[in-house]
Image (cartoon, rainbow, N blue to C red):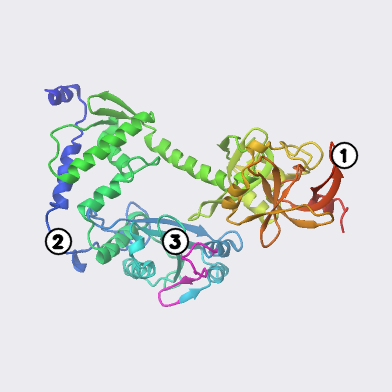
Amino acid sequence: MDVERRRLRGEPMMALASDHLELAARLGSRHRRRRPPLPRRARRNRWRAGRLGGGRGRGRAFLTGVDARWQRSTVKASYSRNGRSASWAAHGTYLAREGAQREGGKGRGFSAEREGIDLTATLRGWQRAGDARLWKFIVSPEHADRLDLKAHARALVSHMERDLGTHLEWVAIDHYNTDNPHVHLLVRGRDARGQALQIHPDYLKQGIRRRSQDLATQVLGYRSEREIVQSRGRTVERLRFTEIDRALIRHGGTRGLVTIDGPTPKAPAARAFRQQELRRLQMLEDLGLAEKVWTRTWRLSPQLETALRQAQLSGDIIKARARHQARLSDPRLPVTVTRIEAGTVITGRVIGTGLADELRDQRYLLVESRDRLHYIPQPAAVQRARGRGQLRIGDVVTLRGEAIEKGVRVMVETRVQALEPGQGAGGRDGSRPARVPEPARLPTLTAMSRSEGRQVNVAEPLVGAIYRGRLVGYGRDRAGHRYAVLDTGRELTAFRTDDLGAVQGREVRVQGHEHEDDRKRRVLVWRLGDDERERDRGQTR
């Protein structure tokens, strides 16, 4: 009766249970001991060059459904145009950075037959040769820890060459600095005839990923029913857009109504999938992204995908803030995403910068103003300013968005203006930041050591002793005493002081002094001076 009542109301019937049964049937019984053999090479997807929907490029795919038992792999694809000078080399330098590979890795890349390749020099050569673009891929098999990533990358490119019908010139480097080991694959934008390499969009979106999945399956075998359930279950409570959400949206149709009913599935995988979807719907309901309108029936928010992707970005911003926490004068400031648009004016102190998307070389800038911390996706003008040394850590700047008419288009140009420390957000006497941090708001020296990845050593005051270095930030000990922490070269050194006027990120001088306290006692203290500021004014030689 309940089914008939919903049919008469015109509500879509979300037969998720039948989908679970169908998938469970394809997975087979968990008691089956023999796995079906892998498909023969002749039966695999055939990739053909051609056109589809008016788009040009090699690798048009005859796309068929991927077996649920295949090993999973993620492939992100992008490209860089040959624009800014040395931008490709800079990307190579970033990929070769210390600490990204396994312990002992030297930041060198590999190709089909070579090891120890200098990525920076290779990419610089391709850019200087006038290549129109550089193709960039990140290949991340789900069980990369059980694969030889270099062998996987070489086999993948070999298949890509057959699919695209041309020899590819490429370099790659394996990274193990995240939860999922992965390979950065860089393909030159020329084919074997020297023409611009065009790759069909469908092949970029699906073809390369399916090749990677197929290759991983050949090595590791089909995923077991248990592995599939566990893999899907790990996404149930994640604050991002997941494959479960994608399935719910698909079943929700145009009205976004999802009903999970019917008899309890007998297959273990189907039962697990149903429970996972119920748990996910309950989580979405708690987040306000789904509304329960009937027994086991929910209406999904039209903003479901957008909101979850925004939540994922928020998580990335929180991580970025944590990396630069030691430089904040007020750790309690709210953080907001600020895009430079026409009329935007931001004045504040540069706290830090980093890579928001290592595939597309998109960077962010953190600027602390009086009332908030701005997370700014860097437009080209900001990147150029950083290249000229205008946006150093600790600098007080104004970023201004201006509308510039170019023909029929209106462009937004970012103007960068460096301010004296006493201007704008800088403060009172030309060196003091907008706020003097209270001890309770400062990170502990232990926390600073952990965030910087280096030991912090406390220096005892000594009359006449002088230290110079970059001011990393201010911290406190357990007793609440305040310290200035300097990067003195080989180590981080903490100096107990109440002089908190120097701008973080600048070159400062610390000198030991003897003076009388309120009780007329002679005590030793550390005093800070801003070397950069004094040098700019011609007060130091």
Disc ID at residue 90: none
Provide residue 451's location: percent of width, then percent of height. Answer: 57, 50
Where is residue 169? Give x, y as percent: 44, 71
- Is 427 on the left-hand or right-hand side of 308? right
Prevalent SS, magenta region: loop
The label nearer to you, 3 versus 2, is 3
- Front position in the image: 191 or 359: 359
How far apart, in angstroms, are the residues tagged by discs 3 and 2?
33 Å
- Residue under the point 37% across and 34% down: 304
Q: Give the residue pinned by disc 1.
A: 520
Disc 1 on helix, strand or loop? loop
- Give the magenta-colored segment's residue range: 97-114
Q: Residues within 10 Å of mark 3 (few under 14, many from 20)?
A: some
- Name the residue: 25% across, 57% down: 70
Question: As drawn, is 211 to the left or to the right of 123?
Answer: left
If you read the primary sequence from the N terminus, does the residue marked by circle 1 or circle 3 appear first? 3
Magenta stretch encompasses residue 362 = no
Work out which quarter of the rendered image holds the C terminus and state it: bottom right
Q: Quadrant of residue 497?
A: top right
- Residue 215: give x, y in percent of width and height: 29, 65
7 shown above or below 450: above
Contact between marks 2 and 1 (CB within 8 A): the answer is no
- The picture places residue 170, in percent across and down from the top left corner, at 44, 70
**Which residue carries the number 2 mark?**
36
Q: Mark 3 sits on what residue?
A: 176
CA separation in Å, label 1 and label 3: 58 Å
Say above or below: 415 vs 214: above
Query: Marks 2/1: CA distance?
Result: 88 Å
**Residue at disc 2, secondary structure:** loop
Q: Is the C-beta separation of discs 1 and 3 under 8 Å?
A: no
